[in-house]
Image (tube, grey):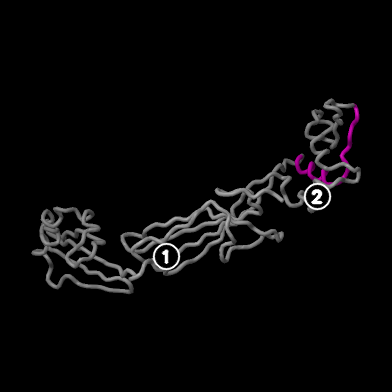
Amino acid sequence: MPLHTDLAPYLKPGYPQSSANVGRTGATYIYVGAEGTLTATAPEDMIGLVWADGRTVENAAWQPFADYSGNGELVVTTGAYAVPAFGTTLEKSYTELNWHPVERPLETNPDFLAGGTYDLEVAGSDGVVPWQHILGWRMEQDASLKALFKYKLVVGGRVSSTTVTIPAGSAMEYLKLIRAGQETFVDYFPVWAKYSIYTGSEPPAAGVIGQKVTTPTGAPEENALGDPFEWVKDGDHVVQQGVTMRWRRTETWTGYTKVYADSAHVYPPA
């Protein structure tokens, strides 16, 4: 016989007592008797059982009397939740924006890129592209020359006797930072999250992740410099909340200044 049938003779007068609120109905049963009789099945093992009212047991607890008689009360609470007649229904959703720090090479800072204040691709006053000076300086073995922002010119794969002094300009500004120990900088990428609560007998369907998508609704479209973000959906997770017919879906996206590849495609630079 079901456990609730075995316990029926011990039901306290006036019980069960019913309760109801929006989307939920339940009842409380109190059984009075000896501990060994009422807890032959441990209260924690009663959770999830279908009880006399057809509802599921949500809580069960033994409460001994203070007289040390070995008697007490077994309190059992049941509950059931209304399930939409047609599929799963969205109850509510909310979003969250976080900024994720990422360490990047100094030369990828916007000031050193094309069009930046210290564009490393544009020839300086001496007609030399800054990168040529930077590479020559990095290869220089003489610390005293490097300290003065100078280097020996390499010709035909050999170090010549010609000493090059790096002029004021983009290469000099870059190397000043390198000399100061600033090899990298911290950039920040937006992480957009959407949390949705559903009610229904089946979980909401999760989407595809790892691929480039359009900007999520409400997420920032560009960074402080006006460069548009490109977004990749990198998370879509659904979990059931307790024993109820409620589901929590968590979706996350990360925005980048440029996406060159995702799990399905590549996007070569123009």
Label number found at residue 75: none
Amino acid bearing label 2: Tyr
Asked if the magenta segment contains residue 130, the reply would be: no
Image coordinates of residue 17 in percent, x first then y, are 20, 72
Secondary element at tag 1? strand
Query: Which residue is painted at 32% across and 68% down in the image?
Result: 83
Q: Earlier in the sequence, mark 2 or mark 1?
A: 2
Image coordinates of residue 171 in percent, x first then y, are 82, 43
Give the residue pinned by disc 1: 197
Label number found at residue 118: 2
Query: Which residue is painted at 80% across and 41% down in the image?
Result: 131
Magenta-tinted stretch: 161-178
Asked if the magenta segment contains residue 165, the reply would be: yes
Amino acid bearing label 1: Ile
Secondary element at tag 2? loop
172 or 113: nearer the viewer: 113
In the rendered image, the vertical position of residue 196 relative to residue 260, given as above or below: below
Give the left or right position of residue 185, taking residue 128 as reference.
Answer: left
Give the left or right position of residue 94, taking residue 71 as reference.
Answer: right
Give the left or right position of residue 238, taking residue 224 as reference.
Answer: left
Image coordinates of residue 163 in percent, x first then y, are 89, 32
What is the spatial separation of the Cα atoms under label 2 and label 1, in whole angstroms?
49 Å
Badge 1 local density, few (<14 within 10 Å), some, or many (20+)? Answer: many
Which quarter of the rendered picture does the N terminus lie within?
bottom left
Image coordinates of residue 148 in percent, x first then y, are 85, 36
